Image: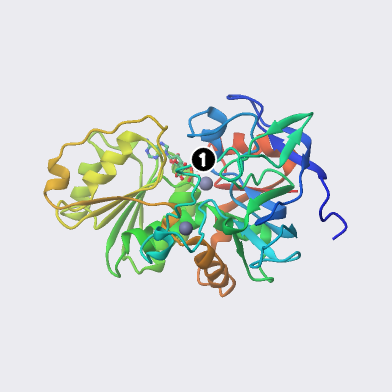
Amino acid sequence: MATSGKVIRCRAAVAWAVGQPLSLEEVEVAPPKAGEVRIKIVATGICHTDYHVLEGSFPNVDFPVIPGHEGAGIVESVGEGVTSVKPGDKVIPLVLPHCGECSFCLNPESNFCLKSHVSESQNLLPDKTSRFTCKGKQIHHFLWVSTFAEYTVVPEYVVAKIDAAAPLDKVCLFGCGFSTGYGAAINTAKVKPGSTCAVFGLGGVGLSVVIGCKAAGASRIIAIDINKDKFAKAKELGATECISPRDFKRPIQEVLTEMTGHGVDYSFEAIGLADTMTAALASCNMNTGVCVMIGELPSDSVISIDPMLLLTGRTWKGTLVGGWRMRDSIPKLVSSYLDKKFNSDLLITHTLPIAKVNEGFELLRAGKSIRSVLLF
Ligand code: APR
Ligand code: ZN
Ligand code: ZN
């Protein structure tokens, strides 16, 4: 490629400081170093987590930063020693690394690679430097992926090569939201055929849980949201009942217990609020119920619960990107999508040019979009 080994000037949405809208800038993107890959991002979804970044409630973020972590693109060039991808390959940058060599990667039950930025700083690449500059200033990376940049540089172990036939403006959701919700049902809860599920929050993540519960053969899927505009899509995707906590005087966990006799088999929290997390826990069967926490709370939050909720046998679990071992699993999920095993396209309500990134955030904040996909 003509650009290989050179600095690329391109567009990126930069967050200069907490609480400010993103600003579309021309940035310089350095070539990939050894073991790194430079990707031309074609499409990127706007996820609720990017919101937490702009608000300053996501851990280990330094400003200025290029957010975005739900992207798909094409490899532009690779650094020395990179063997798993080559220029021209379609790829999805991963929010969770997967080195394949550490003790966690060697455990088939784990998807938390020890090379993860969750335990290190994610503001800079693993060698503690940035590949981005703008107006003479160093710009920080986000989750090592920064997909709100037209070109981004990532370590090789955070890239998954996908089928060349995949539509990038659709499968970008597999980088976070869809995989998280779908995997929470399939991998983390391991929903069984014939079971009853409750899904709290019907954004991109919660609706992906609904898709997962349906794919797993759940016979009853109760969808919960305070915004009833979300109900039509939830039903289209497989919810059998939709309820708003605001329509009841008593707590929603009591309503769900009454609706199901003894509570649901599986409950999922895809909102990110302490109250709905405890409500989701109390909604599942006191003995065999499984509750999966998916929503993110601000980094210093504390939840207090009645210990009896767990003592009686309930299981309370979290999930990291739906439990997928991402470099192996994301390409397989893309293949399942191409085989039409599920229709994640229904989650995409808006497609906007990158210049309208702030409009995309406003649509999400106002509850008018499920996923907006930004195109470069
Ligand atoms: N009770 C029920 N539903 C609620 C409540 C509440 N108290 N508060 C908000 N909601 C609903 C909103 O109306 C919205 O439909 O929760 C949904 C959240 O959806 P999005 O904002 O689109 O968020 P999403 O991208 O799906 O992410 C959900 O998962 O990964 C995490 O960081 C992410 O915490 C976030 C969560
Ligand atoms: Zn690893
Ligand atoms: Zn996300």
**Closer-to-camera residue (241/26):** 26
Left or right relative to 122: residue 321: left
Q: Identify which amino acid the numbered label 1 is placed on.
A: Thr
- How many dots with numbers? 1
Q: Position of residue 372 (x, y in %)?
A: 62, 46
Left or right relative to 105: residue 146: right
Q: Quadrant of residue 80?
A: bottom right
**Closer-to-camera residue (136/253):** 136
The answer to whether residue 230 is visible is yes
**Closer-to-camera residue (102/135):** 102
Q: Quadrant of residue 136?
A: top right
Residue at the image point whose x is 74% and y is 47% from the top: 150
For the N terminus, the quadrant is: bottom right
Q: Quadrant of residue 240?
A: bottom left
Left or right relative to 237: residue 91: right
Residue at the image point whose x is 49% and y is 58% from the top: 179
Residue at the image point whose x is 49% and y is 64% from the top: 100
Residue position for label 1: 49
Classify mark 1 as within 8 Å of ligand 3 or not, answering yes or no. yes
**Closer-to-camera residue (334/346):** 334
Q: Position of residue 133 (x, y in %)?
A: 74, 35
Q: Residues within 10 Å of mark 1 (few under 14, many from 20)?
A: some
Q: Position of residue 255 (x, y in %)?
A: 23, 44
Q: Is residue 91 above or below residue 121?
A: below
Residue at the image point whose x is 60% and y is 50% from the top: 349
Q: Is residue 40 above or below residue 139?
A: below
Q: Position of residue 297 (x, y in %)?
A: 40, 35
The answer to whether residue 235 is visible is no
**Element type where label 1 sits in the image:** helix
What colour-coding does the image apply?
Answer: rainbow
Q: Is residue 200 above or below residue 335?
A: above
